[in-house]
Amino acid sequence: MTDAVDVNGGALPQPPEWVAGELGGATGKGIRVAVIDSGWDRRIDEPRVLPGVGFVDPDDDFAMARNDDDNDVLGHGTACADLVLRIAPDARVIPVKVFGKVLETSPGTLHAALLWALEAGVQVINVSLGTRLEGTLHPLYAACEKARRAGIIVVAAGHNANDWSYPAIFENVIGVSAAKFDSPFHFRYRPNHAMECQAWGVEQPVLWVGGGRPVKHGTSFAAPNVAGIVALIKERHPEATLDDVREMLARFALEVDHSAAEEDEEPAVQPSDAAAGG
């Protein structure tokens, strides 16, 4: 790590050699990342976080109502957005608020947020949440497939218990699990697993509401590190497809783990009748 400090008081990570070499020193310039989460703490002045959108009814966390309220009262979304920017400091983040006063939302709200993000001019979407409700499989898969066909890369956090959840296990999404690393640029690539990337999500300092930096754990905070790396890839290779991005992630990984997935691990999902439409 370098001793440099970013505008929000966090130590800036030192990019590894592949950022300067294979990605030409990419910083995320020109890339927009939608962070579907609890918004951004608007008390923290951060011009790289653009005006976003809210999908939460102020009177009912589980009712959907589109509005301009992207303010984060929980910290979760602020942390995820800041993690993206620590990897890709010249990117821009658009907060898409689906959590209100609790870290729970409805599947319909998540689906609506994904569809909105697809039309927002972003190149990367970070989803640090998931669901195990079977009825959500087809609409969520269709939205992620629409993203793939548009060249938008969706990065999603897997379940914290190393269990499966949608959309992380979709084959058109980069699924992320958590482990401990000493840099947010470090990750393990596991091509035979639905959660193909394992990134820093254990004992990781994150920006929180009010500007503090508590140490947090979870896949939610591993996924934005990968989303930031994808933003660097998309700056250098704007036409990169999901397959191209996967190939580069395997090349840049600290380790490529070719072990087979456990028998009880859910395989990557590709519903035969889930169409993206259009």
Image (spheres, rainbow, N blue to C red):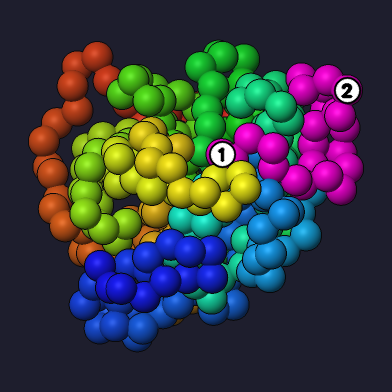
Residue 55: x and y in percent read 79, 36
Labels 2 and 1: the sequence-earlier one: 2
Does residue 58 show up magenta in the picture? Answer: yes
Q: Residue at 67% of width from left, 58% of height from top?
A: 44
Q: Residue 243: horizontal and vertical position, in percent?
A: 37, 57
> Which label number is shown at residue 259?
none
Badge 2 amino acid: Asp
| Element on which disc 1 rests | helix
User: Which x, y percent locates residue 269?
Assistant: 42, 29
**Residue 99, quarter of the rendered image:** top right
The structure residue drawn at horizontal position 76% and vertical position 19%, both measured from the top left corner, is: 62
Q: Is residue 259 above or below residue 124?
A: above
Horizontal arrangement in the rendering, residue 214 relative to residue 110 (left or right): left
Across the whole image, how many numbered discs are drawn on residues?
A: 2
Q: Is residue 269 visible?
A: yes
Q: How far, Cα to Cα, is label 2 from label 1?
A: 20 Å
Q: Secondary structure at mark 2?
A: loop
Q: Quadrant of the N terminus?
A: bottom left
- Residue in the foreground of this view, choosing between 1 and 32: 1
Q: Is residue 24 above or below residue 270?
A: below
Is residue 122 visible to us here?
no
**As drawn, is 241 to the left or to the right of 3?**
right
**Magenta highlight range:** 54-76
Q: Position of residue 157 (x, y in %)?
A: 44, 37
**Which residue bears the numbered disc 2?**
59
Residue 32: which quarter of the image? bottom right
Disc 1: which residue? 76
The structure residue drawn at horizontal position 83% and vertical position 44%, both measured from the top left corner, is 69
Type of residue at label 1? His
Q: Nearer the viewer, residue 99 or 238?
A: 99
